[in-house]
DNA sequence: GATGAATGAGTGTTCATTCAT
DNA sequence: TATGAATGAACACTCATTCAT
């Protein structure tokens, strides 16, 4: 019925499984059951179709991030919540997450590119959240004293890597979520 | 002078910065200063040129891995050594490492593909090394009791993510190496 | 106006005069007055364009063969009719006949190839028709006693050769049709 | 040892089985065990290599034709001898004969082309021989009265077709030679 | 809204041929 | 004699994109 929606959803599926370059406008059109110009009726470009999808993906991601209630009792709960959230969006929207994870860091030269913008924004938000949690934990004596900047960078990169592997899922990854949280707890929280 | 070498090196540079699909044989030829057929004189295919480069990259990687002397005093030194090694190869051969990191997980469907083979071998080796170190640490009482399988998976994914971010290097990442090692030490090693 | 038709007809002309391999898609496009991709808009392949033409040619040929009313008084009339038919299709559709004659026996290795299939079917039909006519003539006492199999093979080959020469037409070939029929009559029909 | 000979023989084999266009200079070189420039050392062109082979083939053919002793008792013996000779060269030199038969009539436009020259010469010789035999037979009362020109044309074309089929040999062609001779005898020789 | 038709600009690849050595 | 290296010219084919309808 709604053809634009069909086009967008099909494109999401194809971009997620094949990447931007390997997906052709003809393939999208065929799988939707329309002709190529129809795709161009709704989207100016293949690139702008991709951008629109990135927008959807990032909106979803940022909405999820913003919805997190991080004013919990302990600083570590914030960290744990952030980790859980990233595992949850893989289960929730695997294709959008895959596009977000995989497509973005390809061409980071162009600063006006949607990819780059989203990437920067995501890093900025995450850095903020992790930094605040770390700061809070350190100040309250809950955490060891870490270099906040380097540690939040590392946590972001770590999460990124774990998500990627989770998506590729080449072998059993059960227990990775719990293990990750435990690992971070031991690394951060001072034992008494 | 040695044109095959020039072609290979240029291809490494371009594949590293643009990826396989976005790099054209014409572009390689132009940057080397030869004509396209010259590329095909030395390599049967664009794919086989890429495979040859992957071979170089993986040989370098596996040689480095195999050269690690991991029979240290403590289990954690093994872990630390593995982390340091992965940071070092980024500094040592950034382009080859980038190709290894970025190009591989694109097409993991075909099990005969060179990418897939390398990816599997790398995971297999790393899994072994991390597992053994973890086992040793747990058995000796040096480490907390972890699920070895899940933890080594997580460590691999974490390293992968950190390396990726290190390569993208969008902001200052100083201190990430030391922080990573410290983070892992706190997470793994029982405090006395 | 109808571009597909123009493309097909131009391709027929070029394939007939130059053969499959020596005819390029660019040449076809230029002679039609379109660009190369237009050819590929209507036909998936150069090979499938050729196959479509072979289909046209063989349909025309087999329709002509099947339309022959061979239940004549004498057995020789059947033979004569077959000979006349093959002369007539050269005059009628010289280019299609040329393609049928010249292109087919090039790659007879692949049994799934359209060429091979047509070739086999044509031989099968002709063998049947000639064999039946010969049998009828021998049984009725109209013909000398011939080895039916060898004779029909020979007649097919003979027709093939005469058609080829007729097409090449390097010198005056007038009277060849009448002569061929007379020659065969003398060879086959018992004189009284 | 003699590389030129090897090259020529390999080229004969490949041209015979694949045709001129489908045979590449690289393929010839590889099968001989030399490099491509070696081929060009002995032959200026791929075309001139082909011409040289045609020369060999036509020399062999014309020598065979010229060696025929056609001053026999009867006119039909001449005809029979010519037929037998053409069957014999297929058995004797199948590859050269194949090249002669198949490659020539492709491009008969260029009158300076070796193919065209050989084709014309062969037709000229055969026409002469058949015409003389026919004339002799008609004058002596051995043959029916035929149109000599049309009949010799037809006989040449017929032989050509039968040879082609003999080479393709898609089914049992036993007895075709004897049948052909008998067929021609009945067609030409007046029964008493 | 949607499409049939068409295309400019590539893309990987091949091949006959050349030339310095 | 023979070859390693190199190339001009072409080739089949693809793809994002446009435009009249």
Image (cartoon, coloured by chain):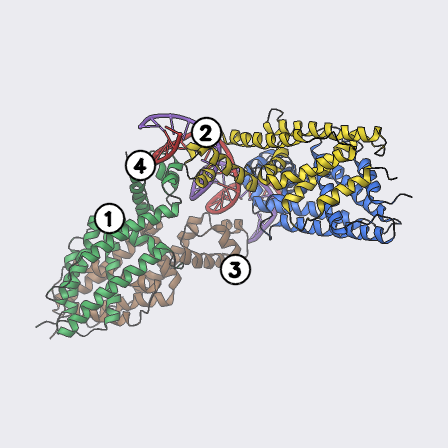
Chain colours: A brown, B green, C blue, D yellow, E purple, F red
Residue C27 position, x and y percent, is 57, 35
Q: Which residue is mark 4?
A: B3
Q: Which residue is mark 1?
A: B94
> How many badges with numbers are in the image?
4
Seen from the viewer's position, the closer of residues B49 and B171 is B49
Q: Which mark is residue D63?
A: none
Q: Which residue is mark 3?
A: A2
Q: Are marks 2 and 1 in contact (CB under 8 Å)?
A: no
CA separation, marks 2 and 1?
50 Å
Q: Which residue is mark 2?
A: D42
* For discs 2 and 1, the disc positioned in front in the rendered view: 2
Q: Is residue F9 above or below residue C181?
A: above
Residue D46 position, x and y percent, is 50, 32
Chain ID for label 1?
Answer: B
Task: Please report whichever mark, 1 or 4, sits nearer to the chain's N-terminal start.
Answer: 4
Residue placed farthest to the right in the image?
C192
CA separation, marks 4 and 3?
55 Å
CA separation, marks 1 and 3?
47 Å
Mark 4 vs mark 3: tell me if same chain.
no
Q: Secondary structure at mark 1?
A: helix
CA separation, marks 2 and 3?
70 Å
């Amino acid at each position: 019925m709604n053809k634009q929606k069909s086009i967008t959803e099909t494109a999401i599926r194809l971009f997620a499984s094949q990447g931007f370059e390997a997906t052709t406008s003809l393939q999208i059109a065929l799988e939707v059951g329309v002709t190529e110009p129809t795709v161009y009726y709704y989207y100016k470009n293949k690139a702008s179709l991709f951008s629109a999808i990135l927008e959807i993906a990032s909106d979803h991601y940022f909405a999820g991030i913003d919805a997190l209630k991080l004013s919990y009792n302990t600083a570590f709960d914030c960290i744990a919540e952030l980790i859980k959230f990233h595992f949850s969006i893989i289960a929730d929207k695997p294709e959008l997450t895959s596009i977000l994870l995989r497509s973005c860091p390809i061409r980071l030269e162009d600063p006006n590119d949607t990819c780059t913008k989203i990437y920067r924004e995501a890093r900025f938000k995450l850095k903020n959240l992790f930094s605040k949690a770390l700061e809070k934990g350190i100040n309250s004596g809950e955490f060891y004293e870490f270099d906040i900047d380097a540690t939040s960078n590392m946590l972001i990169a770590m999460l990124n890597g774990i998500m990627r592997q989770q998506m590729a899922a080449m072998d059993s990854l059960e227990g990775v979520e719990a293990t990750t949280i435990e690992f971070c707890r031991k690394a951060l929280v001072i034992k008494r």
